[in-house]
Amino acid sequence: MSGRAGGKAKPLKAPKKKAVELDEEDVAFKNKLKEEQAKLKEMQQKASGKGPLIGGGIKKSGKK
């Protein structure tokens, strides 16, 4: 065996991504998405500070 005859083939290089031009609508949309993500994260942090919403588990009566 000489060289890479039996070895793993080298993967082909992926073409470079072209720079995408954004117009005003795209920029506004992306900003809106960022704001929504920030609000969602903030709400999750507030919710995580509190205890469980439901008392949870099987409710037992006082009787035996």
Image: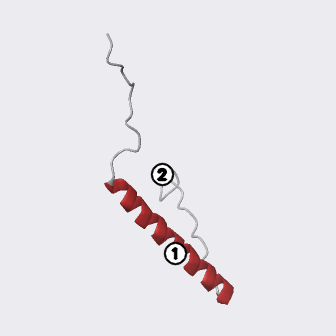
Callout 2: helix, strand or loop?
loop
Q: Position of residue 48 (x, y in %)?
A: 35, 54
Which circle marks residue 21 in the picture?
none
Which residue is at 48% across, 51% downward?
Answer: 1
Which color mode does the image show? secondary structure
Which circle marks residue 1 in the picture?
2
Q: Position of residue 6 (x, y in %)?
A: 51, 50
Mark 2: which amino acid?
Met
When the figure is inspected, residue 57 is found, relative to residue 40, above or below; the finding is: above
Mark 1: which amino acid?
Lys
Q: Residues within 10 Å of mark 2 (few under 14, many from 20)?
A: few
Which residue is at 48% across, 65% downward?
Answer: 40
- Residues 41 and 17: in front is 41
Q: Residue furthest front?
A: 63
* Mark 2 or mark 1, whichever is nearer to me: 1
CA gap between label 2 and label 1 equals: 55 Å
In the image, is 50 to the left or to the right of 28?
left
- The residue indicated by pointer 1 is 34
Residues marked 2 and 1 touching at CB (< 8 Å): no
